[in-house]
Image: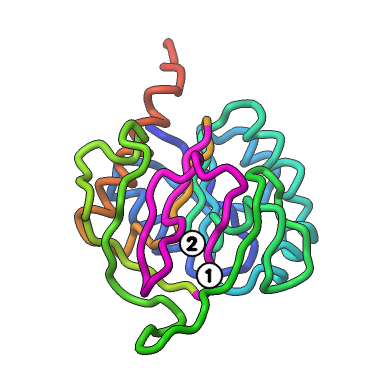
């Protein structure tokens, strides 16, 4: 069974992410304890809200360095929504430094006629890393659910695993770099496609988890 630590930093509805992971066959538990992050088979960082309070909360709980350390050890990591944005160096939404694990910044959507900000609702993915482990059973053009006003601009576009177009702007929808996977959209709200992606992450975790010998 995949033991997944869902990181609690007082931002967003963690229970919906847990429910999706449980449906995908994992054993998720919400925690802000460093020992739990170290013992887990994988980490999930979900979140809704603003960049600066999120980073402030992570620092106040002493979780920044433990998260970085576990990722550096090769532990599978999944960021969801704000959890993707926090991986970057910083955000135009505020002044706090991000985790700095993916070089680049978070920028705000530009206003356009007849284009709503935030980008809210269903939109289609363009898969840019076809071999990304999240995409098993996923097709180019599948629909997922977004709620965001800011988007990631990676320094190296090759980390983009998928993009989405909103108005005239094509932006990062998902990233994949080594053991770091992250989605700007909400897979737990994205019907069968989203649950398939969560199941793919759980399968990846199980494949990398040593089997206990009695």
Q: Position of residue 189 (x, y in %)?
A: 31, 65
Q: Which quadrant holds the N terminus?
A: top left
Range drawn in magenta: 149-177
Mark 1 lies on a secondary structure that is: loop
Q: CA distance from mark 2 to mark 1?
A: 7 Å
Q: Nearer the viewer, residue 36 or 178?
A: 178
Q: Residues within 10 Å of mark 2 (few under 14, many from 20)?
A: many
Residue for badge 2: 81
The answer to whether 44 appears left or right of 104 in the picture is left
Residue 185 lies in quadrant: bottom left
Q: Mark 2 and 1 residues: CB-CB less than 8 Å, in contact?
A: yes
Q: Is residue 184 above or below residue 150?
A: above
Please tell me whether residue 165 belongs to the stretch shown in magenta: yes
Q: Which quadrant holds the C terminus?
A: top left
The answer to whether 8 appears left or right of 66 in the picture is left
Q: How many marks?
A: 2
Residue at x-position 19% and y-position 55%: 192
Residue for badge 1: 48
Q: Position of residue 129 (x, y in %)?
A: 37, 38
Residue at x-position 38% and y-position 62%: 186
Magenta stretch, main secondary structure, is strand
């Amino acid at each position: 069974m995949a033991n997944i630590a869902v990181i609690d930093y007082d931002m967003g509805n963690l229970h919906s992410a847990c429910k999706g992971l449980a449906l995908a066959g994992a054993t998720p538990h919400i925690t802000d304890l460093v020992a739990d992050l170290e013992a887990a088979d994988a980490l999930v960082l979900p979140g809704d809200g603003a960049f600066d309070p999120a980073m402030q909360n992570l620092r106040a709980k002493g979780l920044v360095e433990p998260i970085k350390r576990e990722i550096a050890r090769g532990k599978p990591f999944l960021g969801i929504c704000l959890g993707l944005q926090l991986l970057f160096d910083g955000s135009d939404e505020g002044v706090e430094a991000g985790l700095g694990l993916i070089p680049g910044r978070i920028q705000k959507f530009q206003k356009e006629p007849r284009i709503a900000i935030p980008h809210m609702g269903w939109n289609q993915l363009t898969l840019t890393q076809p071999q990304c482990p999240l995409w098993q059973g996923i097709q180019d053009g599948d629909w997922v659910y977004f709620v965001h006003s800011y988007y990631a601009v990676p320094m190296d576009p090759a980390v983009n695993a998928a993009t989405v177009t909103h108005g005239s702007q094509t932006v990062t929808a998902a990233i994949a770099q080594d053991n770091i996977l992250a989605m700007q959209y909400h897979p737990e709200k994205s019907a069968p496609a989203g649950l398939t992606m969560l199941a793919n992450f759980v399968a990846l975790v199980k494949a990398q988890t040593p089997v206990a010998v009695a």
